[in-house]
Amino acid sequence: MYTLQVLSEAYDAWADGDLPALLELVADDIVFAVNVPARVDSYVGNGCGKGLFADRLAKLLDDYEVAAFTPRWIKPRGPLWRSAHVSYCYKARGGTGLECDGTMRHHWRVVDRKIVHLELLIDAARMDAFRRLTQAERNGDGSGGARWAVRC
């Protein structure tokens, strides 16, 4: 049962934008992957190791505020994995007024109360478009306070 507790704490930490609390739940040798085609940039991307994971999440938090991040459900996926369906809302920092909300799916593996594996299933092209829109808005060549809804 500790797996659900760890995941609940992880979601609460991320919803609060509390990266140090989230990283306390992560194994040093975490493996993470995001379903991102080669042509699409991703903050998290694919990789191994707590340091790399922390650096990539910190960059995301530098650019976006986590306005909402709530699991709709968490279910077993075989004997070792848990799957989750998550609602989120990110707000671009820097006064752009832009936000992106939607849903994503996560596949987790927790061992000895530490997250050892995370796979994220997102609408990568849409999230990349939102990232590019916020960058353009910060540079003064965007379209104003748009709100995008992303569903996975």
Image (spheres, rainbow, N blue to C red):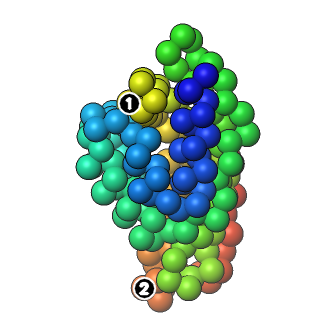
Q: What residue does disc 1 label?
A: 116
Query: Residue 38: which disc?
Result: none
Q: Which quadrant is home to the C terminus?
A: top right
Identified at 66% across, 30% down, the residue is 74
Local secondary structure at mark 1:
strand
Local secondary structure at mark 2:
loop
Which kind of residue does numbered mark 2 sit on?
Answer: Asn
Label 2 crowd bin: few (<14), some (14–19), many (20+), radius 10 Å = few
Q: What residue does disc 2 label?
A: 139
Residue 40 seen in this snapshot: no
> Horizontal and vertical percent for residue 39?
35, 49
Which kind of residue does numbered mark 1 sit on?
Answer: Val
Q: Which quadrant is home to the N terminus?
A: top right
> Horizontal and vertical percent for residue 43?
39, 55
Which corner quadrant of the image does residue 106 belong to?
top right
For residue 134, above or below residue 79:
below
Label 1 crowd bin: few (<14), some (14–19), many (20+), radius 10 Å = many
Nearer the camera: disc 1 or disc 2: 1
Identified at 50% across, 60% down, the residue is 18
Look at the numbered discs 1 and 2 and tell me whether their residues touch, using CB distance below 8 Å. Answer: no
For residue 128, above or below residue 30:
below
Pick the front one: 115 or 120:
115
In this rendering, would 79 be left or right of 58? right
> From this viewpoint, which residue is outermost toward the right?
72
Of label 1 and label 2, which has the lower sequence position? 1
Residue 67 seen in this snapshot: yes
Identified at 56% across, 36% down, the residue is 7
Pick the front one: 101 or 79:
79
Identified at 60% across, 34% down, the residue is 5
Distance in Å between CA atoms under marks 1 and 2:
38 Å
> Horizontal and vertical percent for residue 143?
59, 81
Which corner quadrant of the image does residue 145 belong to?
bottom right
